[in-house]
Amino acid sequence: MKAVQDLSETEARAELERLAKDIASANLAYHRDDAPEISDADYDALRQRNLAIEARFPAMKLEDSPTDAVGAAPGDAFTKTRHAVRMLSLENAFEEEEIEDFAGRIRKFLGHSGELLFTAEPKIDGLSLSLRYEDGQLVQAATRGDGKTGENVTANARTITDIPERIEGAPAVLEVRGEVYMTHAAFEALNERQAQTGGKTFANPRNAAAGSLRQLDPAITASRPLRFFAYAWGEQSAPLAPTQMGSIEALAAMGFSTNPLTVLCDGVSAMVAHYRQIEQGRATLGYDIDGVVYKVNDLALQRRLGFRAATPRWAIAHKFPAQLAWTRLLGIDVQVGRTGALSPVARLQPVTVGGVVVRNATLHNEDYITGRDSRGEQIRGGKDIRIGDWVQVYRAGDVIPKVADVDLAQRPADAEPYRFPDRCPECGSEALRIEGDAVRRCTGGLICPAQAVERLKHFVSRNAFDIEGLGAKQVEAFYKDGWIAQPSDIFELKARYGEGMKQVKNREGWGEKSADKLFAAIDAKRRIELNRLIFALGIRHVGETSAQLLAVHYQGWAQFEAAMTASRLGEGAEWQELTAIDGVGAVLAASLVSTFDNPAERAAIDTLVAHLDVQDVVRRAPVESPVAGKIVVFTGTLEKMSRAEAKNRAEALGAKVSGSVSAKTDLVVAGPGAGTKAKQAEALGVRMIDEDAWIALIGDA
Ligand code: IVH
């Protein structure tokens, strides 16, 4: 068969017609007659070739092209899709000791002595994809997105040869997860082609893979040779096997590509040995990997270990060391962040670090430049960093590059110590350092344009309000022209600039349609989840996780707002309640309370919330268990499971685990050696049982 590149127009037209017929007849045979005429692989090859020809000759695409017959129509923006089971990320480790700790923590959690079995496999540097099969048929492919909701890229995923359209021997529902990646060879060929045709070139294979998978036209995806390794799963109506390794083998038997460097290890030294071996061969693999992933092999143990907020306890990524390069420091810029923090940024003579051109790198804060850490102790042997210095730049994976070291032998004779500004470079307000804080901050607050813009950018960002069509760039432009100054202005944009002299649709880059779309997108976000709103406010120390904790605790905006208003720094019932939330410390609490106490901040929040319909947190369907809603205290030694596991199990069953006994306690589980707490329980008449009775009570639930 002729390569697609070599087809003449006439040949291409004839082949597209033939392919359309063959694919249509294969579809009928399969779907209508339940009697496939060709193998799945041959079917996939036909579709793949059809797409590739269409990509090369877009004008020739048939009106009833088979490409359009399945999945999302090309040209449609991606729809969002909620993952049935969340897509998580992995904890990272760099040192061997961290792997020892990881295995140690697991043994402790499980109360297991001796070695456990782990799988070890390369960590592929691509993007993760979840493939949903129902009755063996691929029905949906979704990117990870924020872990809960991803983008529906089904039509594009169907063009990837490693992804089977149909699989045999799978349970009725099976979500196969893995990594989409591009080989070095394909990446280079793609960039060359792009450069020749004036298209966009990519910085590295991972960006190229992501850019190619997220194409609105699946024909373009088809013309980019993407690959896929399966390494995990989401929802499944029945387990594939009792072990990680067995499951991977089952996936391979179904026709998925699984990584050949996946092995079973009987402990940390075997794991680390495999890591070293993979690291040695890294350059010859032909695709990018950035570490090795270890996973507990026994799936029953994985279940017992469970998850933290965003990562499983049973797996860890052992990353390869960062990559380094030396270059000249041309200058230092000071940027002002959303909370007023002044961050020094190194402007560098461009240098390639691990395949990526680096022009800027972080210098952290003023102490870092002078050669001290936040406790005043020396770093880099006390060497300061000066403009003109020859500096070492360090980059690890996705992390922002940083200036790591300086070569004093190459310091220019006239280089002077860097003087950190004591005024905000953006608004001129005083920039202060409060004792104990490594960071100098602009005191301009809402009058500082840099802070205001950064807050707005944060407000519209993906995990906050995520307003379609209103990204960082647009916010900056609107701010510059004085159309929006604070988040509430976004919701008044239509009323103010929907008609009249100054209109959104007349701005550069906007038109009637895009302006209407923007107003609709803004309206859609008036209804907002409580956790997103709390996070979007951009209050210092309040990240996504803490916003979620606060939302779950207070359940609704009214309750949250009332509690923040009533809270006094360091005292009173509301303060007690706030700081008693697991995961909310005094620093975070103080930041919240002082924000709500600040009249300007408070006014901005109130004006904003008046535009919104904040959704209450829907309580999770109450777990049915004998301990649901009960306050449980564990004391003494547990023999069948560790404290951590007991707590985890109890919480999963809807109980609240407390560290101290009070009149509110419902149940005390006392093991041998229980002391004060058991006495308190007795005095208070709280029900007390031993570990066996506890296990009998919760049963196998
Ligand atoms: S397991 C619940 N295995 O790394 C854990 N992830 O940093 C599921 N990745 O989002 C992930 N190679 O995109 C796993 N062999 C591998 C992997 C791998 C690459 C990616 C994946 C994940 C990210 C976490």
Image: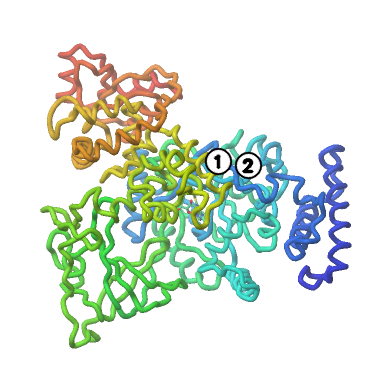
- Mark whose residue sits in front, 2 or 1: 2
Q: Nearer the viewer, residue 660 or 681?
A: 660
Q: Residue under label 2, please give it.
A: 132
Mark 1: amino acid: Gly
Q: CB under 8 Å between callouts 2 and 1?
A: yes
Query: Residue 464 placed where, x, y %?
Result: 40, 43
Q: Residue under label 1, please give it.
A: 234
Q: Nearer the viewer, residue 202 or 455?
A: 455
Among the two numbered marks 2 and 1 on one chain, the one whose residue lies closer to the N terminus: 2
Mark 2: amino acid: Arg
| Residue 636 visible, this orientation | no
- Image quarter where the C terminus lies is top left
Q: Secondary structure at mark 1?
A: strand
Query: Residue 139 placed where, x, y %?
Result: 68, 41
Q: Is residue 448 left or right of residue 499?
A: left
Looking at the picture, does residue 515 appear above or below residue 572? below
C-alpha distance separating marks 2 and 1: 9 Å
Q: Nearer the viewer, residue 501 or 687?
A: 501
